[in-house]
Image (cartoon, rainbow, N blue to C red):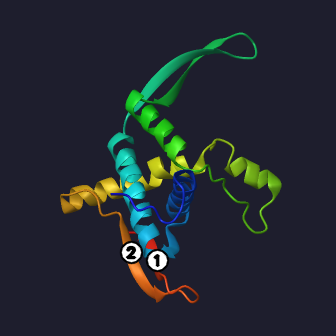
Amino acid sequence: MARKLGKRTDQRMAMLRNQVSELLWYGEIETTVDRAKEVRRMAEKLITLAIRTYQDEVTVTKSVKGAKGEKSDVQFTNDGAKKLAARRRLMAELRDLQEMRRDKESKAAYNARIKDVHHPLIEKMFKEYAPKYDARATELGKGGGYTRILRTGVRRGDAAQVCILQLI
């Protein structure tokens, strides 16, 4: 049974989605133990979804007219049906976090770096986490267990159990 965490359903789901997004973006978050257990449930399901579909790609060849009217064939790599459905589900479940500008990075360099990336967190899921955890699953012979909870003690003020939730 899901924990209610002292909030209404809409508030609770928004909080959990935000925390899952932050966990996947930064790799770790600090929160209470009960919240961490719920965030872990959601995060592991989304990572598993990305692992199962990240290799589903289709190569498409299109004819493109050049500036002088000559035709040339250009190849594109598109998502397959399963990966596209998984991408849409991830976009529905996660908050759309944007790439931040680095220190002393010019605006032109920043725009060139993020030019082709519309949803950085989703791209990170498919290009970084899915291959990493898929290799780990084949090495260990089992999937799951992508996160760990490190208890850090109690919070001052309300004595709630606090922990750090990390991606392994």
Name the residue located 55 percent from the left edge and 66 percent from the top edge.
26
Residue 164 — which label? 1
Quadrant location of the N terminus in the rendered image = bottom left
- Element assignment for label 2: strand
Q: What crowding class fits label 2: few (fewer than 14 Cα within 10 Å), some (14-19), or many (20 or more)?
A: many
Q: Is residue 125 left or right of residue 64?
A: left
Q: Amino acid at mark 1?
A: Ile
The residue most toward the right is 107
- The reply to whether discs 2 and 1 touch (Cβ–Cβ < 8 Å) is yes
- Residue 15 in the image: state x and y as whole percent: 56, 59
Measured along the vertical axis of the image, is residue 92 above or below residue 127?
above
Q: Nearer the viewer, residue 151 or 52?
A: 151
Return the x and y of residue 114 as percentages of the image width and height.
68, 48
Residue at which label 2 appears: 149
Choose top left, top right, bottom left or bottom right for residue 71.
Answer: top right
Q: Is residue 51 above or below residue 34?
A: above
Name the residue rendered at 73%, 60% in the picture: 101
| Mark 1 element type | strand
Mark 2 or mark 1: name the one nearer the start of the chain.
2
Q: Is residue 77 above or below residue 71?
A: below
Q: Is residue 156 above or below residue 72?
A: below
Image coordinates for residue 164, horizontal then vertical, percent: 46, 77
Q: Is residue 160 left or right of residue 108?
A: left
What's the mark number on residue 100? none
**Is residue 117 or residue 3 the one in the foreground?**
3
Side of 106 relative to 120 (left or right): right
Q: The residue under label 2 is which amino acid type?
A: Ile
- 6 and 111: which one is in front? 6
